[in-house]
Amino acid sequence: MRVAAISIFPEMFRAITDYGVSGRAVSEGHLVLDCINPRTFTHDRHRTVDDRPYGGGPGMVMKAEPLEAAIDEAVERVGGEAKVICLSPQGRVLDQAMVESLAEEPGLVLLSGRYEGIDERVLESWVDEEISIGDYVLSGGELAAMVLVDAVVRQIPGVLGHSQSAVEDSFADGLLDCPHYTRPEAHRGSRVPEVLLGGDHERIRRWRLKQSLQRTLIRRPELLQERELTAEEQRLLAEIENERPD
Ligand SMILES: COc1ccccc1CNc1ccc(C(N)=O)cn1
C-alpha cells in the first residue's frame, strides 16, 4: 500500500516507519510511506503555511495554496488513484469496518492539519473524506494519521506473521478481546485460569469466546446490539446471564 502523509512535521512519522509491525511493513515493502511538507511549496522568505483567520478569532488557519500543492504532489507520489483523507475532529469516527475498507484502497493521501485547522476551500475541493480517531481535539492531525496507518497496515496480508492474526484481533469479530496470560503460572498469588493450562483447545476456545462476550456485555454492551450472534454465542450469553450476581 502506498501512503503519502502531508505534514509540517514529517519527522513525527518515524514513530510508525521505524518501529514494530508498521516499521517491519515498511522494511518488507508492504507499506510505502512518503512524507510531504507543505513548506516545500511556499515561496516567501518566511515559508508561510498559516495565516490569521478571516472573521477574527484566536489562532491561525493553514493556507490553501501550500496544502493544495502538497496534495497534488502526494497524489502523484501515490500513483494517481488516491483517496485524500483529512484527519480532523469534524470527521467520521474511525472504526474497524472503516479500517478494513481503507485497507482495500490502492493509495491514501493523509492530510494532517495544525493550528486551528485548514482553509475550508481545501476541504471542499481536494479532500474526499474527513476522518476522526475520536471525539477529542489534538494539536495536530499527525498522531491521528499514524493511528489510522497502524490500524490499516495490520490488515495487509503478510504484515502480521502467523503468530499474530488480524482476524483474531478483538474488534475484528466485533467483540472485545479475552484476557491473556503468560508465565509464570502464579504471580503475586494470582494464578492463571486452569482451563488455559490444560491442552483442551476446544475448551480453551469456548472459554476465550465466553470471556470476550462477558467483557463486551459489561464494558461495551452497545457492540452486541450491532452484531449477529451465532447459536453458540447466544448459548454462552445465556450462561453468562444466569451466572450474573443478582
Ligand atoms: C484543531 O485541530 C484541527 C482542526 C481541523 C483539522 C485538523 C486539526 C488537527 N487536530 C486534530 C486532528 C484530528 C483529530 C481527531 N480526533 O482525529 C483531533 N485533532
Image (cartoon, helix red, strand yellow):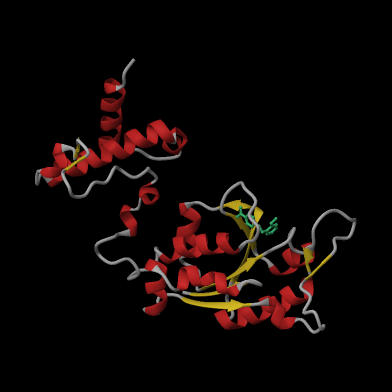
Name the residue: 44% across, 73% down.
Answer: 18
- Which of these two is toward me, 72 or 58? 58
Q: How far across and how far down the image is residue 189, in percent?
A: 19, 35
- Which of these two is toward me, 69 or 48? 48
Is 170 situated left or right of 144 in this image? Answer: left
Q: How far across and how far down the image is residue 76, in percent?
A: 61, 83
Q: How far across and how far down the image is residue 246, in percent?
A: 34, 15
**Is any atom of residue 230 visible in this view?**
no
Residue 6's quadrant in the figure?
Answer: bottom right
The quarter of the rendering in which ligand 1 is drawn is bottom right
Q: Residue furthest top?
A: 246
Q: Is residue 214 above or below residue 140?
A: above
Name the residue: 32% across, 66% down.
Answer: 160
Name the residue: 56% across, 61% down.
Answer: 143
In this rendering, the count of numbered labels is 0
- Which of these two is toward me, 217 or 134? 134
- Which of these two is toward me, 210 or 229? 210
Q: Residue furthest right?
A: 55
Name the residue: 43% across, 66% down.
Answer: 153
Q: Is residue 183 above or below residue 217?
A: below
Residue 19's quadrant in the figure?
Answer: bottom left
